[in-house]
């Protein structure tokens, strides 16, 4: 997690990781702790872009 660049490294159930860009109006990254489970709705990237960007993200409550 990097609150300065508004990015979050996520790992899926299979163990793959990726850096996701988070709009600071969508989620306060400082409210998350390593290991928290989140769900993400991704934005459709522009043609030719490899940037992963969250349109919405929320912490899973267990």
Image: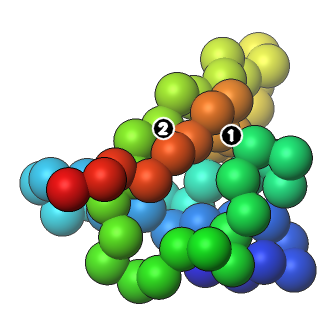
Residue positioned most to the front: 62
Of label 1 and label 2, which has the lower sequence position? 2
According to the picture, the residue beneath numbered tag 2 turns out to be: 40
Q: Secondary structure beneath disc 1?
A: strand
Total marks placed: 2
Look at the picture and state if 54 lies above or below 18: above
Camera-nearest label, 1 or 2: 2
**Quadrant of the drawing holding the N terminus:** bottom right
Residue at the limit of the structure toward the left, as seen here? 14
Instruction: Please name the residue shown 41% across and 83% down the image.
Output: 34
Q: Is residue 15 above or below residue 35?
A: above
**Could you say where residue 57 lies in the image, as x and y percent from the top left?**
56, 42
Identify the residue at image location x=84%, y=55%. 24
- Comparing 46 with 36, the one in front is 36
Q: Is residue 12 left or right of residue 29?
A: left
Horizontal arrangement in the rendering, residue 42 relative to residue 24 (left or right) = left
Where residue 16 appears, as percent x and y from the top left, is 27, 59
Scheme of image coloration: rainbow
Q: Which mark is residue 53?
A: 1
- Mark 2 element type: strand
Dot 1, crowdedness within 10 Å: few (<14), some or many (≥20)? Answer: some
How many residues crowd mark 2 within 10 Å: few (<14), some (14–19), many (20+)?
some
Q: Position of residue 39 (x, y in %)?
A: 40, 41
Q: Is residue 29 left or right of residue 12?
A: right
């Amino acid at each position: 997690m990097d609150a300065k660049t508004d990015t979050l490294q996520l790992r899926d159930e299979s163990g793959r990781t990726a850096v996701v860009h988070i709009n600071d109006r969508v989620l306060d990254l400082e409210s998350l702790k390593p290991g928290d489970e989140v769900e993400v709705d991704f934005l459709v990237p522009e043609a030719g872009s490899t940037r992963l960007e969250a349109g919405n993200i929320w912490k899973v409550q267990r």
